[in-house]
Image: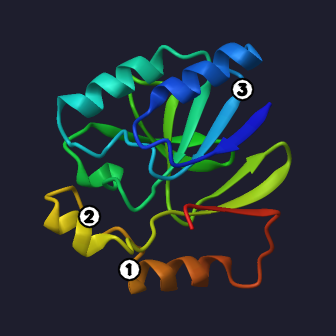
Amino acid sequence: MVYVTGDIHGDISRVKDFCEFYNTTQKDILILLGDVGFNYYLNERDELMKTVASELPITLFCIRGNHEARPLSTDCDYIPKPFCGGMILQEEQFPNIKFAVDGEVYYFNNKKCLVLGGAYSVDKQYRIMMHWHWFPDEQLSKTERNTIYNNIAGDTFDYILSHT
């Protein structure tokens, strides 16, 4: 089964409760549409949350939001791997946590899905004032947008998975 939610902002207890209620397994996929919180603090807090999430009986497919770092911008050892027809980024120690790659196409239940991560933080100034994390590369760059557009021009999709 494939499920979709987003904006858990580091509150993995919601996902844990969900797994218990629906009696999920590793074959089930929970698509998290951004602001998961796995790459927010960029320190041991992220590692702890990933450790807790890796023990859950579900596969987590994470799309990047604006309130988290791009996986490849972290010090984590992400490895590209194939998943559902596209490439994902995954850390070996967390095999059930998969990070979508912007512009990749994935197939879930025979449905063709395009992933476009990131977003614009309308709260940017407030976040900076409060000394909260803000990520300058939160949005797709113009070059990334053009590359994705050129790769998908004329194509059709059943779903676009995005944070916004």
Residue at 44 percent of width and 51 percent of height: 35
* Image coordinates for residue 151, horizontal then vertical, percent: 61, 77
Q: Please say whether residue 136 is visible from this viewpoint.
A: no
| Kind of residue at badge 3 | Asp
Mark 3 / mark 2, whichever is N-terminal: 3
Rounded to the nearest whole Å, what is the CA distance between mark 2 and mark 1? Answer: 13 Å
Q: Is residue 113 left or right of 151 when viewed as pictured? A: right
* Residue identified by numbered label 2: 135
| Kind of residue at badge 1 | Ser
* Residue identified by numbered label 3: 28
Residue at 80 percent of width and 73 percent of height: 156
Q: Are marks 1 and 3 in contact (CB under 8 Å)?
A: no
Q: Is residue 44 left or right of 30 when viewed as pictured? A: left
The quadrant where residue 28 appears: top right
Is the residue 106 above or below the residue 83 in the image? below
Give whichever of 71, 124 is nearer the camera: 124
Residue at 84 percent of width and 42 percent of height: 109
- Which class describes the residues within 10 Å of circle 1: few (<14), some (14-19), or many (20+)? few
Q: Are marks 3 and 2 in contact (CB under 8 Å)?
A: no
Q: Is residue 120 left or right of 106 when viewed as pictured? A: left
Give whichever of 103, 164 is nearer the camera: 164
